[in-house]
Amino acid sequence: MMPCDRDFGCIEQRLRKRQCIYTPDDYVDIVANARVQKPFTVVKMTSSDFVSLNTLTCSLTKRNLTDSGHKWDFRSVCQFRFKSDMGMRMEVSLTMMTTNGKQ
């Protein structure tokens, strides 16, 4: 059992006590008040908190060269990094694979 399982358990207990939930704000209240000691911090997100990656997806389709002209294979990527200050750019960390598929 992980610590987060206890957190979800507290929230589940509060949910069982409610007969009806009408709005997302009801969920916010339930989660925020699920524990007396160390109450949960609930951050309400708005549509501006979400971004679409469709443009990035289109620009990545079948791209196999970096900005500096080096070849890369999408299957060899072990880490992707997206930063808000980089616009629609992506940084990748590649694993080095041998011909037999081992690192």
Image (cartoon, rainbow, N blue to C red):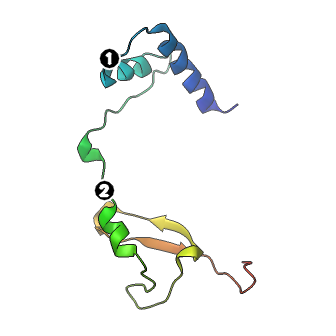
Q: Which one is nearer the viewer's eye here, 79 or 75?
A: 75
For disc 2, the marked residue is: 52
Q: Quadrant of the N terminus?
A: top right
Q: Secondary structure at mark 2?
A: loop
27 to 59, vertically: above or below: above
Q: Secondary structure at mark 1?
A: loop
In this image, 4 relative to 11: left or right?
A: right
Type of the residue with mark 1: Tyr
Type of the residue with mark 2: Ser
In this image, 33 relative to 96: left or right?
A: left
Query: Gap in Å between the C-alphas at discs 2 and 1?
Result: 28 Å
Q: Residue at x 41, y 91 (%)?
A: 69
Q: Residue at x 63, y 31 (%)?
A: 3
Image spot of residue 68 (x, y percent): 40, 89
Quarter of the view holding residue 8: top right
Q: Residue at x 71, y 85 (%)?
A: 98
Image spot of residue 100 (x, y percent): 75, 83
What is the crowding at mark 2: few (fewer than 14 residues within 10 Å), some, or many (at least 20)? few
What is the crowding at mark 1: few (fewer than 14 residues within 10 Å), some, or many (at least 20)? few
For disc 1, the marked residue is: 22
